[in-house]
Image: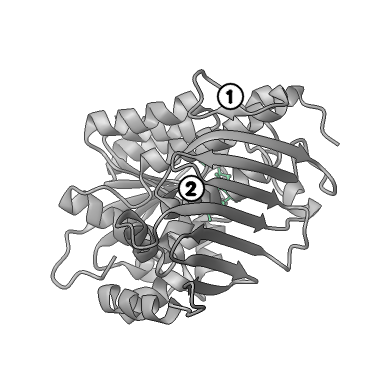
Amino acid sequence: MPEQAEQPIKLKVAIIGCGRVSEKHIRAVAKLSDRLCLSALVDNNPDAPNNLLNACKKKIKKISELKSSLTTYIDYKEMLKDIHPDIVAITVPSGLHYEIAKDCLTAGCNILLEKPMTMSNKSSRELYELASSLGLKIAMGHIYRYFPIVSLLHEDMVNGVFGKVGHGSVIVRWGHDNDYYNQAAWRGTWKSDGGALMNQTVHALDLMCYLMNAEAVKVDGMLSRRFRDMEAEDTAMGVFTFTNGALCQVEGTTATFPKDHEASFFINAEKAAIRIALRKGKPSYSITTEKGKNLAFRYLRRYIKNVGLSYLISVAKNPHYGIYCDLHNAITTGTSPVADGRSGYLSVDMVLGFYRSVLKKGDVELPLSSEFKIEEMSKLELN
Ligand SMILES: NC(=O)c1ccc[n+]([C@@H]2O[C@H](COP(=O)([O-])OP(=O)(O)OC[C@H]3O[C@@H](n4cnc5c(N)ncnc54)[C@H](O)[C@@H]3O)[C@@H](O)[C@H]2O)c1
């Protein structure tokens, strides 16, 4: 999303949940001070907002200006009444997304909801439908959609430039140690988080749908818990079938080393093999033709021409910057965010279908035909 040239409309933002991910939100909002104003920080731990602001000190210029414009709250309902924000970012534990998102939408706010949307397919769909009926926007924290050149690859896939899709493969090796899981009681539980698939892999599945321009129609998966001391899985492997007939294999794990994070995406199409990878924070791209030519640089040039170099740098450093630009644009122009509420519920449906296939010990059709809540997974004996 290119930066706006003239006097953008300024929108009020509130952030509910001042934990790990909220730093990325606050940095993005601070950088967009021409169009966003941080009006409130909310956390039921009264020390959390100040701890967050202190942690951001070195990364945000003019932090004192930011502080002076905001009020802190411990009760989000009180904040909604006092502030009436245009956008509420919901960055609380996943098990609380549904209730808080519903209250924010009902209060007339657009929301930036962290992934995964909710812990059940029914409640995710309900949020999407509620926002649509109220004319409000939901932007999901699906950061991968905002990586450089991804929007162009999607556009070209939609326009048939790559021809038929053969198959895909996605790997998320996002190592977290036991200290991470012990940091907060909700992490790694079936009720409030799920495992490597629901937490770390859900937005990678969303990216495969976006890049393939297709939706999942079937899944068969397996789970294990090898190294981490948690209730849910630390490793998931499975295969999805998509509406275009393509198969997509998935590996999602947190059982790898925390200092060796890797997410990689591969799409084998008739006219190009697309590879996007992120390893230890460094991105790499290759779009290879049948003759072996790599078109990545060409895509990068086209992307810079569309969005500008400064946007590219900002979004590469912090993809949440792209989400906020896009949401601001969607609200002020009446368009839909790139990672919208539909992408939220479809990706949750994919994960829950995967989980259900583990319980069923066989493949499951998607979208799920009945409600499935993640807590049903507590019946599963993992090893
Ligand atoms: N998109 C991404 O890249 C990304 C990255 C990390 C986490 N996430 C998602 O963001 C969410 C938060 O993750 P995190 O790692 O920041 O968690 P965290 O535990 O570090 O932070 C959660 C914060 O919410 C607060 N909180 C809990 N209940 C609350 C309530 N009722 N009202 C107000 N505040 C409340 C907690 O005190 C805590 O400060 C999760 O859903 C996670 O999946 C997304």
What amino acid does circle 1 point to?
Lys
The answer to whether residue 148 is visible is: yes
Instruction: Indicate the secondary structure of the residue bearing disc 1.
Output: loop
Name the spot of residue 288 as percent of width and height, x first: 49, 73
Residue 136 lies left or right of residue 189; in this view the side is: left
Residue at the far front in the pictured view: 291
Residue 294's place in the image compared with 375, above or below, is: below
Residue 64's place in the image compared with 144, above or below, is: below
Q: Which mark is residue 373?
A: 1
Name the spot of residue 34 as percent of width and height, x first: 24, 68
Front tag of 1 and 2: 2
Residue 193, image quadrant: top right
In this view of the protein, which residue sits in the foreground, 254 or 222?
222
Residue drawn at x 51%, y 73% is: 285
Residue drawn at x 74%, y 47% is: 181
Residue 92's place in the image compared with 10, above or below, is: above
In this view of the protein, which residue sits in the foreground, 42 or 261?
261
Name the spot of residue 246 as percent of width and height, x first: 51, 46
Residue 273 lies left or right of residue 228; in this view the side is: left
> For mark 2, does the 10 Å Cα neighbourhood hold few (<14), some (14 to 19), or many (20 or more) residues?
many
Q: Which mark is residue 206?
A: 2
In this view of the protein, which residue sits in the foreground, 78 or 235?
235
Image quarter of the N terminus: bottom left
